[in-house]
Amino acid sequence: NVLYRLCEEQLSKQAHYDFGLRNILAVLRTAGASKRQQQDKPELELLMRSLRDMNLSKFVAEDVPLFMSTLEDLFPGMHAEKQQHKEVEAAIAGVVTTSGLQKHDSWILKIVQVYEMALVRHSVMSVGPSGVGKTRITETLHKALGNCTASLDLPPMVGQPHREARMNPKAITSPQMFGALDVIANEWTEGIFAQLWRKANKDKKYFTWIVLDGPVDAIWIENLNTVMDDNKILTLANNDRIPMLRPNVTLNFEVEDLRNASPATVSRAGIIYISDMDLGWAPFVASWCDTIEPKAIGTGLRPLFEQHVNPLLDFIRKECQQKMLCAPIALMQSMCTLLEGLFPSLPNPETLASEQMLRVFTFALIWSVGGILEPADRQRVDRFLRERGLDMPAAQRADEEESVYEYFVDEATCTWMHWDSRVPQWKYDGHDLASDFPTLTIPTVDSVRTMFILETSISRQRAVLLIGGPGTAKTTSILQVLAKQDQSSVLAKKISFSAATTPLIFQRTVEGSVEKRQGKTFGPPGGKSMLVFVDDISMPEINNWGDQPTLEIVRQLIEQGGLYNLQKPGEIMQIVDLLVLGCMLHPGGGKQDIPNRAKRHFHVMNVPLPGQISISQIFGSMVRVHFPEEQEGVSEDVVLLSRRLVELTISVWDAVKNKMLPTPSKFHYIFNLRDLSRVFQGIFMCATDVVKDEVTLLALWKHEAMRVFSDRLVNFDDKKWFDETVNKVIEETCGGAKAAKVKSETYFVDFLRPPGEDPETGEETPAPKVYEPAPGIDTVKGVINGYMKRFNETNKLLAMDLVLFEDALLHFMRISRLLATPRGNALLVGVGGSGKQSLTRLAAFIARAESAQITITKTYSANTLLDDFKPLYRVAGVLNRGVAFIFTDKEIKEESFLEYLNIFLNTGEVPNLFARDEYDAIIGEVSVPYQQMHKGSEPTKEDLWAFFIDRVRANLHLVLCFSPVGVKFRNRAMAFPGLINNCTIDWFLPWPEEALGEVAARMVLNNKDLRCEESIKKKLIAQMASTHRQVSLSTGEYFEQFRRNAYVTPKSYLSFMEAYADVYLKKVQHIEMLASSINTGLSKLVEAGEDVARMKVELKEKEKGLVIAQEKSAVLLQEITASTARAEKKKAEVQAVKDQLAGDADIIAGQKEAVERDLEAAQPALDAAQSALSAINAKDFGLLKQLKNPPEIIKRIFDCVLILLGENIQPCNLVKPKEKLTLDASWSFAL
């Protein structure tokens, strides 16, 4: 407890330090085992040794002296010898020798420490930076333990055959590692680690080391807690519990650090820390020198390594700025690879003179250790090496850029030669420089030496990683190397990474590029090898734990040579004949780095921005092709001025780079060689017969410079500065007279020529596309209006009524220029309602290109996007027609959509887009046009597919319409760099007040409901424009005051005008309704006056009739009085009758009461009769029918029944004369 408390207080704080109870238990176990083996030793000595050996292995180098001092204070005067493992240590020494390794004591000690830790812990963690030999330690220990002879006196793991199952937990997801339950099908799929653990515990033949080789995070490692502690049980989500049945399995973790591990995890494992000081680069170089053939090379190089490498490493670390930090051993691996590739090409390498070997050594040294520096630091390295007396080339030029990096060692003479001597002469064999421009590569000193280093490393199967700023030809250099490979034996696969690239995407891409060879071995088709080029390899997202899972699976593919089969968990697919190449931007400044453990496998080389000489060589060569000397129709003045275009462009480019620096709000202010290329591509679109004089050429150059540089600027101030800068550069270079002539901008377009006419059929033929200066804005406006009418006639559903004010015309011409450019892709940035989509559709119509746009639905997904891509590919690649694919930020339902767009912009090929049958169909369809272009050739499928993709990239124009509002645009642009690098940006600024007025004029003048004079309408138009402008300015003041954005967009302006028109119409209707009501009321009042006058006349007439009526009324009143007297008399008579009837009613009531009393008395008899009646049934009636002569009483009863029913009876007869009538029985009727 005292020792561990002091360690916690005094030692440095490291994530892998643990001084808890589990550590104490491991020490006690070790001490107990030592006591049983060496019973004659004092217990204190054994305890001291156990404390030292079990803790010393995990300390960093700085803490070792302090720990040893503390231990000596606790055990004063005591010295414990190191525990001996004679059999194991002898076996380790033998394996080190047979493996060609060096007996480096500190490194061999780490092997013994891993062995000692494995004796007391079944979970061991090897922690240390990249390149310290963690994997080699495990492999050496396996072989040594297997080579030992088993004995009862030795631990169980000694003498058994050992095997290793290695996996990278970060290259897969947690469900893929442990298992997943399909909720719908209720099926359990076991994970990779679960399968490995299950198989290892069932294996009775081998002692298995399950090596988890990847970064630790608090997710997957916590799931192994029950495996790492004394339970030794793997618990899965399906309630399976897989125990360690026998002590024949060890978990071995190989990690760089434990920054994300919890203390509980650290305490469960035995930690072995391996620092870079335990091994260093010298043992690796010594082993390499021992193995290289011929032996004389290794003997000669060994002292050179010892003499020059460490001083240069120290100099670079202290005096230079490395563009990427690399472990020294990784640099030495790259250097040895270069030397392996250089020596076979030299004549008689076994007899090289010492100075010749020194030159080759120096060349390899500067392109490995010094290959990650920028030009300024390379100059420092050059001076440093010269000061050390190395055989360096003498400078041939008085140039600041001249250094040893400008030279190489000639294979024939082993002398220094300038790279210029290896630059081939470029010759253009095509017919249309503008169309072929994207595919042209001009060899320069920079490209030649980069390709040489690439090819040398590739020849030795060493992965290469090019780093550099944007536009430094990293991708182009690798693609050139890929194109130079023998296609009969080498295939190429290009992959583009972005922030949305996942390990699964990478694995599916690799799996789709290989085929099964035998067993579990896979490789490229046809037994060929494959170079996999990963562009923007650093782009995959860094997760919350600081790891890049996508880069981990790349490392697994390079290190282990395979990937785990996700369909058959636990089975690894060995992939052979595959080499990974990559390129990325410089890490830092918001750009990501890649993991150190992945970086170690690459030969990292910095590709700096080409110097002015190289840039002039690149574009000057093409200018000389486009404007050749002594060509008919090209004036000498134009040719002379064309030779200065490169100088002009570089001057403007340098000024823009120095002034327009990127900021969070101007993150896209990144200007590189791509921009220079776009300027000259635009110049080459204009035929030489159009450029008749110097002014036209200068105007053309200025126009293209404005399109490339100025169109992406985000405010008027920046644009004004650029315009002034361009004019100043022209004035300084060409003179004030010429600058004055091009001060006002001239616009170049290709749609001014009218359509032709077929002389035979008289049908209209497409208008010729001639890139030429426009006579004026009004002319362009008239042509576009004509095309817009034709568009509306053709596309009724998409008909548009655009107000073509000057700003809109300028944006239209920019979009039209991009659609006419091969591989021209546009990024239109503007707030809603700016007209981005409408202008693009119209420009596509004029360019005779189809316009396409997706329709978002609830079920729209990435697979649906790929399905929408397929017909566009066929139109562009098979039919060779232009397509404008419009994609807005509102259509980004998933971020993975941008992943596919980024891949398309970078490579032109969306992975796994077509199924095999579709792929074969496309190959068949493009073979005919390929043969027409390359007559007599025998293309392979790869040639035809490349031809198809080139057509797609040339014809399929991606037009991205994004809004700059918020942070989404910036985040997406940084996550998917292809959106910025491979698109020409056109930034839509707020509409000027003149444009607002023109739009308002269209609404006001065309609105027939507006009832006012023309002067009022003009004032209304001005007021609308002014109001919108003032509100826009107020939003800026609002932001300055409250730091919150409020946006007033063109869509707001259009909505404002629509609302005004709507309110105006409603007000007019309301006023008309009120006027109608008032007019109706007035007319009613007039009618009422006329009625009153007429009624007065009628009243006079009726007054006369009233007198006569009064007289008649008096007579009638007398008659009524007489009638009333007669009525009173009649009333008295009626009252008397009424009284008599009331008396009769009283008599009737008395009689009624008497009858009711009689009825009540007869009621019992009636009830008895009813009861008797209910007692009669059908059987009784049947019995009566059988009686032929029933008794008299029965006959009489039925006679009564007949009488009651009104039936016929026998008539009455006299029985005797003069006696009473007697009724004869009517029995026959009763039957």
Image: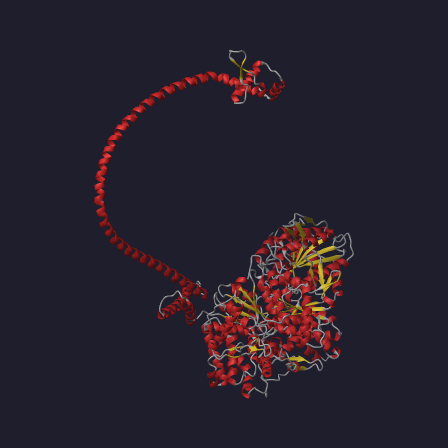
**Image-quadrant location for residue 144:** bottom right
In the figure, 933 relative to 889: above or below? below
Q: Is residue 606 visible?
A: no
Q: Is residue 807 visible?
A: yes
In the figure, 1067 relative to 22: above or below? below
Residue at the (66%, 72%) spot, across then down:
947
Question: Which residue is at the far front?
Answer: 1217
The number of callouts visible is: 0
Residue 1148 lies, in percent from the top left, at 38, 20
Q: Nearer the viewer, residue 967 or 263?
A: 967
Residue 477 lies, in percent from the top left, at 63, 74
Image quadrant holding the C terminus, namely top right
Task: Left or right? Give the position of 1000 relative to 960.
Answer: left
Q: Nearer the viewer, residue 425 or 923?
A: 923
Q: Nearer the viewer, residue 549 or 1062?
A: 1062
Residue 60 lies, in percent from the top left, at 62, 61
Colour approach in the figure: secondary structure
**Image-quadrant location for residue 396:** bottom right
Q: Nearer the viewer, residue 1043 or 245?
A: 1043
Task: Left or right? Give the position of 955 relative to 1141.
Answer: right
Residue 1090 lies, in percent from the top left, at 27, 55
**Image-quadrant location for residue 1119:** top left
